[in-house]
């Protein structure tokens, strides 16, 4: 079988459709910042926004994963990446995340020590669609099945974090914030 390489720069291609929201945010910062804050605070605010967004984009652009005879190698944009040999890979599946009315899918591996690793570059979503996601995922599964014994392939039990959706997490955080801030507010009133 051929070695598989999935690169972030093939998936996260900058497109003109992604540019207007970024420009809108920057223009709004400049307009409202200049009116309310002045020139220098606005400059620093725009610089801080770019200082956050540019490295995030560069890291996603440089991320990659490789699947081959030696196992699964994952690199999140820094360094040479980390290789997980096939004997450490316990399960391979797709993580489905639903948020804001859209669904994204990411291939991931479960390791023998309980950790999980998503495979950069092997993802699909409405914003970054990958038409060949299912085909590539099945190619990864074929490598895994070819390189491991059936007794090594053990589906992990669902953990608490598997049951928490982004909506549920948001509700739990909101309840926690109210539970902490309400007594403080009431104590300050008396």
Image (spheres, grey):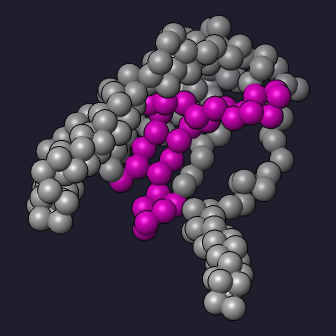
Q: Name the residue rendered at 49%, 12% in the picture.
A: 79
Q: Main secondary structure of the magenta part?
A: strand
| Residue 139 point in image, percent of width and height | 54, 26
Decide: is 174 above or below 77.
below
Q: Quadrant of residue 28?
A: bottom left
101 or 154, which lies in front? 101
Q: Taking 190 as reference, is 46 left or right? A: left
Horizontal relation, residue 183 to residue 79: left or right: right
Residue 137: x and y, percent? Answer: 54, 34
Is 129 on the left or on the right of 30, as rendered?
right
Asked if the magenta segment contains residue 114, the reply would be yes
Which residues fall within the magenta stretch? Answer: 98-126
Work out whether 41 lies above or below 187.
Answer: above
Q: Residue at x 60, y 43 (%)?
A: 94
As drawn, the residue found furthest toward the bottom would be 190
In the picture, the quarter occupied by the C terminus is bottom right
Residue at position x 78%, y 56% in the image = 160
- Total marks drawn? 0
The answer to whether residue 121 is visible is yes
Between 144 and 96, the residue placed more toward the observer is 96
Looking at the image, which residue is at 29% across and 45% down?
49
Q: Is residue 171 visible?
A: no
Q: Point out residue 1 in the picture as x, y percentages from the top left corner.
A: 55, 11
Residue 14 part of the magenta segment: no
- Residue nearest the observer in this picture, 170 or 83: 170
Residue 146: percent from the left, percent from the top?
69, 18
């Amino acid at each position: 079988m051929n070695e598989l390489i999935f690169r972030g720069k093939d998936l996260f291609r900058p497109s003109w459709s992604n540019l207007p929201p970024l420009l809108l945010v920057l223009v709004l910062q400049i307009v409202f910042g200049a009116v309310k804050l002045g020139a220098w605070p606005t400059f620093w605010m725009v610089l801080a926004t770019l200082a956050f967004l540019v490295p995030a984009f560069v890291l996603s652009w440089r991320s990659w994963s490789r699947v081959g005879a030696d196992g699964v190698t994952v690199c999140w944009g820094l360094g040479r990446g980390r290789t997980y040999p096939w004997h450490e890979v316990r399960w391979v599946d797709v993580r489905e995340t639903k948020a804001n009315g859209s669904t994204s899918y990411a291939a991931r591996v479960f390791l023998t020590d309980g950790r999980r690793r998503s495979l950069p570059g092997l993802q699909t979503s409405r914003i970054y669609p990958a038409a060949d996601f299912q085909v590539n995922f099945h190619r990864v599964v074929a490598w895994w099945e070819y390189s491991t014994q059936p007794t090594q392939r053990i589906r992990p039990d669902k953990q608490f974090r598997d049951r928490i959706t982004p909506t549920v997490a948001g509700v739990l955080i909101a309840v926690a914030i109210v539970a902490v801030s309400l007594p403080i507010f009431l104590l300050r009133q008396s």
